[in-house]
Image (tube, rainbow, N blue to C red):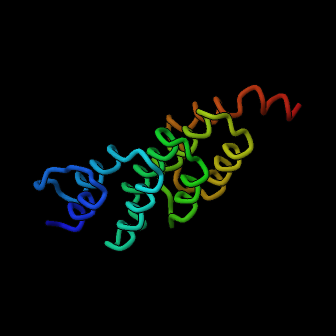
């Protein structure tokens, strides 16, 4: 039994024994319904050397923001990544857009532009506009 399968068993999440690490982690993420389980999963990923893997970070951020509505912890994960990719920026901006966080969204977007990497893609702009849209215009003029 792999470490991931053993971990899934501890969480009482049933996963197929034939799943690889990526599939196993995704199965656990999809079946978790409490923040404590995801924190434990994040601890597991740290212990197996995947603390800064963009793929897992993206899944954790998306799950925490969309299913558990825990934007603060998602931002904590985001802020502790070495070089977030455009998908992670998109995930955070999507989360901010779903619960209008004017200042946080615009600050994150400016940080992305100032850093020069990653470059915004076509999914970034609608979220920035949705978050900031008319509220930002009203505060600036």
- Position of 138 compared to 62: left or right? right
Across and down, in percent, residue 60 comes to 43, 52
Query: Of 133 and 35, which appears nearest the observer?
Result: 35
Instruction: State which quarter of the image contains the C terminus.
Output: top right
Give coordinates of residue 4: x percent, y percent: 24, 63
Q: Residue at x 36, y 66 (%)?
A: 45
Vertical comparison of 103 with 52: above or below: above
Residue found at the far left of this picture: 18
Quarter of image, res 79: bottom right
Which residue is painted at 21% across and 49% down in the image?
Answer: 14
Q: Is residue 102 above or below residue 44?
A: above
Which residue is more in the foreground, 101 or 134?
Answer: 101
Q: Position of residue 58 (x, y in %)?
A: 43, 51
The residue positioned 23% from the left and 51% from the top of the image is: 23
How many marks can you see?
Answer: 0
Quadrant in the rendering for residue 98: top right
Closest to the observer, 8 or 29? 8
For the point 80% across and 30% down, the residue is 137
């Amino acid at each position: 039994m792999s470490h991931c399968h053993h971990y899934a068993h501890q969480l009482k999440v049933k996963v197929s024994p034939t799943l690889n690490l990526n599939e196993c982690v995704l199965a656990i993420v999809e079946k978790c319904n409490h923040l404590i389980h995801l924190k434990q999963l994040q601890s597991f990923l740290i212990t197996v050397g995947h603390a800064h893997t963009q793929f897992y970070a993206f899944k954790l951020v998306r799950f925490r923001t969309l299913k558990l509505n825990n934007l603060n912890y998602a931002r904590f994960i985001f802020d502790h990544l070495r070089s977030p990719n455009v998908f992670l920026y998109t995930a955070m901006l999507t989360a901010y857009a779903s619960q209008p966080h004017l200042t946080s969204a615009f600050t994150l977007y400016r940080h992305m532009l100032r850093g020069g990497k990653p470059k915004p893609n076509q999914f970034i702009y609608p979220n920035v506009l949705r978050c900031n849209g008319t509220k930002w215009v009203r505060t600036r003029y």
